Image (cartoon, grey):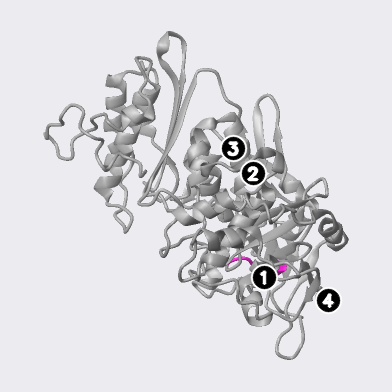
Amino acid sequence: MTTQTIRFFYRGSVREVRDVPASRTVLQHLREDLHCTGTKEGCAEGDCGACTVVVGECDTHGALTLKAVNACIQFLPTLDGRALFTVEDLRDAEGALHPVQQAMIDCHGSQCGFCTPGFVMSMWALYENQPASAGLPSRDEINTALSGNLCRCTGYRPIVEAAQKMFDYQHYPRVPLERAPIAETLRTLQRSDTFEYAAPDARGASFGSPVFYAPVTVEAFAALRAQHPHARILAGSTDVGLWVTKQFRDLGNVLYIGNVAGLKTIERDAQTLTLGAAASLEEAYAALAVDYPELAELWTRFASLPIRNAGTLGGNVANGSPIGDSMPALIALGAEVVLRHGGATRTLPLDAFYLGYQKSALQPGEFVAAIRVPRPAPNLRFRTYKVSKRYDQDISAVCAAFALRIGEGGTISEARVAFGGMAATPQRAAHAEAALTGAAWDEACARNAMDAITADYQPLTDMRASSAYRLKVARNLLWRFHLETRDAAPLALSDVNAFAFEADEPGEAVEPGKAVADAAREPS
């Protein structure tokens, strides 16, 4: 096998890399090979944001797009055909600071400085992606841009102020990055067929070394998957990356899905929203929120923006984590998963895809090609809720999704209830659904369904929550759903948070107007 060279745009020119392991991270390459130490290593798992860099690639129209990602979990071969920007790129040739950097200084947004380059790169991505015609970004947009960066020195107020101030400097005219020449360079680097990379062994031979395959067509990906059924499929590396950085695992052959344009498509017809498996989480949730605006909060609370920029919805579904936040909502909406083996495809309901803990219905050589979500139905009442210790960038203790179709006469014609964090897989609540179906959506119905939930789940106790807490949260979230969607005077979120929920102990009285129990309140 002939080893191909990793080629990417960096610091004004095309850089070529060979003779490094395929699992070498972008952060390792920057710090250890290039000695560019502005990018820091903190957690090595994509959580703290100290390693944030910006990756550029051409979209379907050939224009350059910029996305903040975590360098600590991105493997170097994934840069092939792309551009890499780090904090060293920001100062101009005369040594003047970029407005992002100057704003951080002027607003006292840095103290120890370790996390500062990561904040700066997240802010730079916001700066470059904010159209001048759109005005200043909102506070929510700034918070989203900074959701993947953690700081314990200055706190967030001066950093948020810097993100606002960076657009105001009169003596630093806002000259966006010259995207067109970079996009033209990237187009010359694009592969027309499968990119194969393998690091040579100590003797300089590539034969027998693990291979990084990066096909560009769906057909080539399907053929390689059938040929190498045990190869590790790599999407955004937001989970697999940790297998290397935290568990020091050998991945073996890797089949990269990130260059397959045909698996990144997002399409709508009258009945279905079809999300390609390689569509990023950010793009997939944006499409879902158009049809289901109730997903807006879950979208922004799913990990962080750099993780959503890199990770894919198909990877999240294929992973099948019992605490994955996407699956309860998709299951409640009746989503289907499209599986492909070679040229053949089959479709399964998503709730039938998970067979057990980290076990799915995927057959050897098969892969997730797309997720199909029904378009909104008339008289659908839908909500999702995430309960975690932290509001941003935290793993759920419980994630709930409820979808009811109200038929003629005000009765529930169909009920779909799904939870994450309550079982070995994302799982529907069959007993609760049975209690809801055919009943009027009133308080008695909601109470019966709350009681039925205890027959659906026997959750574990772990570091995130106890079994009793999870059951109470599950019950109370269903009650909250009732309060928000009932026919008789639905309550707004502010009203729900002041409404009495079930008592902490059996038989304990609940005072009228008592604040919602901690077990039922989402962090704020």
Give the residue type at disc 1. Glu
Residue in the image at 61% along x and 66% along y: 71
Which residue appears farthest toward the top when viewing the image? Answer: 409
Placement of the N terminus among the 4 image quadrants: bottom right
Q: Earlier in the sequence, mark 2 or mark 4?
A: 4
In the picture of the structure, the residue carrying the numbered disc 3 is 336
Give the residue type at disc 2. Glu
Looking at the image, residue 419 sits to the left or right of residue 100; the answer is left
Say if mark 2 contacts mark 4, CB within 8 Å.
Answer: no
In the picture of the structure, the residue carrying the numbered disc 2 is 283
Question: For numbered disc 2, what is the local secondary structure?
Answer: helix
Q: Earlier in the sequence, mark 1 or mark 2?
A: 1
Q: Earlier in the sequence, mark 1 or mark 3?
A: 1
Q: Relative to 388, does residue 215 appear above or below in the rendering?
A: below
Residue 49 horizontal/vertical position (percent): 53, 63
The label shown at residue 88 is 1
In the picture of the structure, the residue carrying the numbered disc 4 is 2
Q: Relative to 126, does residue 419 appear above or below in the rendering?
A: above
Give the residue type at disc 3. Glu
Magenta range: 73-78
Q: Earlier in the sequence, mark 2 or mark 3?
A: 2
Say if mark 4 contacts mark 1, CB within 8 Å.
Answer: no
Q: Is residue 64 visible?
A: yes
Count neighbours of disc 3 (C-alpha within 10 A) and say few if under 14, some if 14 to 19, many if 20 or more: many
Let me know if residue 76 is in the magenta part: yes
